[in-house]
Amino acid sequence: MAVEQLQRWFAHARLRSCGQGLPVGLPANVWQCELIVAGPDGEHAAALRWTHQGTASVTVPGAGSVWRLDGSSSPVRPGDAVQITERPILITY
């Protein structure tokens, strides 16, 4: 089911960049792919984030939502801390 959720996230997205750790402004164990997602309200930025081991806390750059592999989501505001784990999350803003 997790793979299906990842496919849904990428269905209407364009990849902008991918990177890991300190060079992209994240903790050393965090990976990120930045996306542009097309939706009914136009395009918006998003980031897929996960760790290769352990957990990390990161802040979100803008207001939006955090989407989890189980399909649940929660709103976030600029500066909110989000827990990153080995299970990818999609942050839209």
Image (cartoon, rainbow, N blue to C red):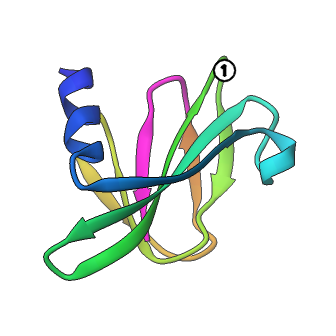
Left of 27 or right of it: where is 90? Answer: left
* Residue at 44%, 26% in the rendered image: 87
* Residue at 49%, 75% in the rendered image: 77
Q: Where the C terminus falls, by quadrant?
A: bottom left
Left of 32 or right of it: where is 93? Answer: left
Tell me the residue that label 1 is attached to.
54
Residue nearer the viewer, 69 or 5:
5
Left of 7 or right of it: where is 18? Answer: right
Residue 34 lies, with reference to residue 37, above or below; the image says: above
Is residue 42 visible to the viewer in this orientation of the structure?
A: yes
Residue 57 lies, with reference to residue 53, above or below; the image says: below
Residue 37 lies, with reference to residue 24, above or below; the image says: below
Position of residue 55 measured from the top left corner of the image (x, y, whole percent)? 64, 29
Residue furthest to the bottom in view is 41
Residue interval drawn in magenta: 85-93
Residue 86 is covered by the magenta coloring: yes
Residue 42 is covered by the magenta coloring: no
* Residue at 67%, 45% in the rendered image: 57
